[in-house]
Image: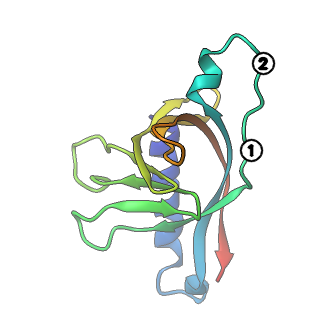
Amino acid sequence: MTILDDLFNLAEENWNSIQETADSTQQVVVYAAMAQVWASDLKASNTFQPLLPPIDRLIYNPPITLKSPASFVGSLLTITAPNFHIFPVQPNYGIQWQGNASTAATDDETGVVYFHVDAGGWGNVQAFVAVTLYNLRLEAF
């Protein structure tokens, strides 16, 4: 999960660099470009068009205490690292996609995070979501 490890470590470095400085009015953010495909479309032999939600702005929330989770929170997507500061444990990452929980998987070579969720709505609809995270930076709030 190198992409998520790097994302949280870099966010923490940026967050620590602005504490108690004139830059403390800034937030650490990353933007997520997403594509959603219904599981039934993946099983079908015909072509399909993925749903492309708008780019989501995820704001970094550092862990408040040693055992609290670090997270990136957006309007559609939340990525959590529940044991981010507990060493030597490797962080496990959680996903909340429109209120539905999932487990993250990554393709570190392409820089894509992906997961499978029960999308709800019309019965038991399953969806596959791929996310590219880019442009981690400080922004004024």
Q: In x, y percent, where is residue 61?
A: 45, 69
Give 19 or 64, whichever is nearer the viewer.
Answer: 64
Q: Which residue sits furthest front?
A: 123
Considering the image in quadrants, where does the N terminus appear? Answer: top left
Picture quarter containing residue 48? Answer: top right
135 in relation to 127, above or below: below
| Label number found at residue 52 | 1
Does residue 92 appear left or right of residue 130 in this picture?
A: left
Marks 2 and 1: which is nearer the front?
Answer: 2
Report the amino acid beneath label 2.
Thr
Mark 2 Cα shell of 10 Å, populated few (<14), some (14-19), many (≥20): few
The disc, 2 or 1, on the residue closer to the chain's N-terminal end is 2
Does residue 4 appear left or right of residue 53 in this picture?
A: left
56 in relation to 123, above or below: below
Considering the image in quadrants, where does the C terminus appear? Answer: bottom right
Identified at 59% across, 64% down, the residue is 75
> Residue tagged by mark 2?
47
